[in-house]
Image (cartoon, grey):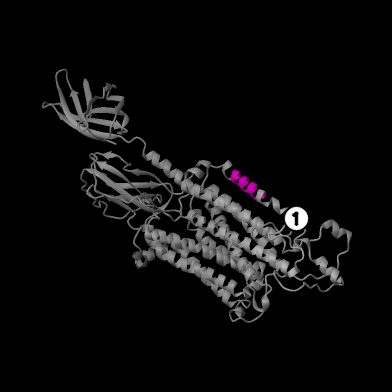
Amino acid sequence: MHTGSPASPGSPPSRRPLTVLVLVAAVLALLFGGAAPALAHTALSGSDPADGSVLQTPPRQVTLTFTESISFPDEALRVLSPANERVNPRPAQHADGKANTARVELSGELPEGTYTVAWRVISADGHPISGAFTFSIGKPSETAATVTADSPDDTAAGRLYGFFRYLSYSGLALLVGAAAFILLCWPAAVALRPVRRLLVAGWATLAVATVALLLLRGPYEAAGSLASAFDPARLARTATGKPGIAFLVRLALLLVAAAVMRRHPAVRPFREGEGSPPTDFGIRFRLAGTALALGLALTWATAEHASAGLQVPLAMPVAALHLVAMGVWLGGLITLVIALRDRGPGGLALPASAVGRFATLAFRAVAVLVGTGLYQSWRQVGSWEALTGTSYGRTLVVKVAAVVLVLYVASYSRRAALRLLREPVPADEAQRRPEPEVVRVAQLVGASGPRKVTGGSGGPDTAAEGRTDGADGHGDGDGDSDGDGDSAGLSPAAESERYRRGLRRTVAAEAVLGVVVLAITTLLTGTQPSRAAVSESASAAVGQEPQAKVVTVPFDMGTANRRGQVQITLTPGRVGENTVEAVVFSEDGGLATVPELRLTLTQRESGIGPLDAKLKNQKGYWATYDLRLPMAGEWNLDIVVRTTEIDQVTVHGTVRIT
């Protein structure tokens, strides 16, 4: 119920939906109007050998470079031969001590053919990323290597990990929201058994989910089986990594929270159903609760999106505030629904003043949510193009739409809440008449019997004055909050109960929509940020830029000084227009000039050719820049090398066009 502050109930509620829409439009304009260029979290930026390259000699190692620092799970980098055999005997290491690189050494004897490099690493924000590419030695070939292209989350361990991630967010919301409602809005709510159960349920859900995430982290990172979750070696590696440390700290904070709650004198009596409802938990207890909530939220911020990318020192506390505000609002809504439905010992009922305090608290929480959400969205998305062109951006659009719907429903919660709150006497009227000496007693939401006013001499008239237009439903211009018609003739108790039912319905609807927003938020935490996706696409485009296909063919005319090699380079070596460069090397490896060099290409299987490359002498090498190849596949090269006016030889080679 993130409504306006009850201190200003006179603002027209009918304008609230329009105000909400204008606010959302304005903040989106601020968000993307001055968006900075895309900046990645972690993406593959290059490799050696390059994707699709053809090498004449076997490489001694394979090196991958990423845009940010990475860590290695089991089997982080595998190089597979054409026969699907592992050719890197040792695991990956950082190259030259650089945290954004991965390197493996290769076996000494590598046959010709196409090799597959499969990689899976852990990005700086704690999420696994994976991919694969190929390179060839000598010439391309068929390969028996198979590499799955599934998403890192599309495994049994990944799906379970996502489920428990959602449970952990839900547990945090229940725990923080129920605690905030008790500590800041209505301390006597601790006497309600359903509220205490909600508090315990939030704690238990978060604890169980955290233990499950700790166990599943290893299989999730390495795409392993669920059985490996209990592998002591893998669990030990998880416990020393950044996510594992965050999980252990979270569990320690939960134990501290449980110990504090068990030992507090205001809480203990209600475990046995004894004592009287507390009126205040004290500033120290509230500060301790705030510190624990922020500490729990930081265990997410230190191991997820906020821990990588730009402005990390600012992003982490902002992410923690966002989570705490989410918990205060959503968990508080659920607690309010329960408090509206249940009574405590001796008929204890929710007072209207508590509704007002929660309305103020929820408004402040949503203000924090909007501010921190704007910053996080700018940081993760960065541009309008990324908003509509990436999975993260499209999911964020759905979340914004859901939030707008929640705000719209919240406007009706405000209208219902205003009827349960005492509206203050207008300032001009207060100046015209003296203030009666009245001590007002807080109105109980749904309490039976007439309201009592003590401590003054106003008698019945004073009591009538104490009930304001906001309480009787005729002074705020809203009409009936629940649409049941005119309330004239109802007793104060019946009227209060009627407003109470309307508030319960709207707050329940708001809470359900809040759960949907939470589910979308959980999905966002497991989705690659738009900035990273855009950068990865750019890196992939760079990797797809023209790659040269090089063919070297020896020739021998049978006479002295008539032996050498001719090297043909086709760029990019793909269907369509290609550049062809040819260089002749002498027997001793130096460049040689020849009076004539001709090249024709034929694809015998399809009956295409011969196509004359029409090479021209470029004073040291031969070249053409507009050879068009119409079809992919194996092409035969016929090369005529003339070394003198009467000596020439024809040699042959092959090249695979993709």
Q: Is residue 3 left or right of residue 614?
A: right
Majority secondary structure in the magenta region: helix
Q: Is residue 321 left or right of residue 588?
A: right
Residue 469 x %, y %:
78, 61
Residue drawn at x 63%, y 48% as measured from the top left: 21
Above or below residue 36? Residue 578 is above
Q: Quadrant of the C terminus?
A: top left
Quarter of the figure with residue 629: top left
Q: Residue furthest top?
A: 645
Q: Quadrant of the N terminus?
A: bottom right
Residue drawn at x 88%, y 63% as measured from the top left: 434
Whether residue 587 is visible, yes or no, is no
Does the magenta-highlighted stretch encompass residue 25?
yes
Whether residue 402 is visible, yes or no, is yes
- Judging depth in this view, the residue of 534 and 418 nearest the camera is 418
- Judging depth in this view, the residue of 195 and 263 nearest the camera is 195
Residue drawn at x 64%, y 68% as measured from the top left: 340
Residue 227 x %, y %:
34, 65
Residue placed under numbered mark 1 in the picture: 477
Does the magenta-highlighted stretch encompass residue 306?
no
- Judging depth in this view, the residue of 115 and 592 nearest the camera is 115
Total numbered labels placed on residues in the image: 1
Label 1 element class: loop
Q: Amino acid at mark 1?
A: Gly
In the image, which residues are magenta? 19-30
